[in-house]
Image: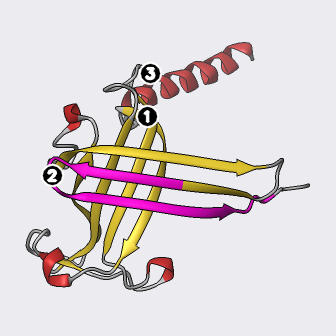
Amino acid sequence: MLYRYFRVWFLTGIIFAGNLFLTQPVLAETLVESNAETRIVVAMRAGQAELQKQVPAPWQVISIPGGPFKDANFFMVFIDSFLVQDAQGKPEKGGTSRRVVFAVPAKNAQTGEISTMVTGGFIANPESVPGPYKNFGHAAIQSLHTQKGENSGAGTGEDSWEVRDNGEGAIELRIRRTQAFSVYTA
């Protein structure tokens, strides 16, 4: 009787081991960088004809159809990365990064695909120019973030950005905000 169970277990083991060679390994994405950052997104409506010049054919600039960004067709994203690390956890290009990204929602006239296209921007670190999309310029960027609150109550904050390129161009953003914190109790 023991011999019969041994044959079943042996056969099961062979089948299991054979399946290991027949399966494809699952590959995850390769970690390139990790970061901790704050982002402020400013959505607005800009001249369609001017924006269209920034988008390659067959893409067409579109407006957001609904939600909090309804009718917006141009975005400025202010990104303050206060910790940037490579895949090994070492600081990447100084360990911090400030940038402003310009983006437009667009639709491919041939396929109907909708995407957000990065049309340019500015980066504070000259080593990072021209950026991941090959369309960023260098600029002096200053940001200031303050936040005040007590215990788990609502807080207030202020954000200030100044972006100055090498020419005469400048972007300034100043906002005040109130934050409400939700306290979860079980």
Q: Secondary structure at mark 1?
A: strand
* Residue wearing tag 3: 89
The span picked out in magenta is 159-182
The answer to which quarter of the image holds residue 8 is top right
* Residue wearing tag 1: 34
Q: Residues within 10 Å of mark 2 (few under 14, many from 20)?
A: some
- Position of residue 98 measured from the top left corner of the image (x, y, whole percent): 36, 42
The answer to which quarter of the image holds residue 13 is top right
Q: Which of 48/158 is in front?
A: 158
Q: Quadrant of the C terminus?
A: bottom right
Is 68 drawn above or below residue 32 in the view shown? Answer: below
Q: Are marks 3 and 1 in contact (CB under 8 Å)?
A: yes
Picture disc at residue 135: 2
Residue beneath the point at 10% across and 73% down: 53
Q: How is the image coloured?
A: secondary structure
Identity, as a three-letter code, of the amino acid under mark 1:
Ser
The answer to which quarter of the image holds residue 18 is top left
Q: Secondary structure at mark 3?
A: loop
Identity, as a three-letter code, of the amino acid under mark 2:
Asn
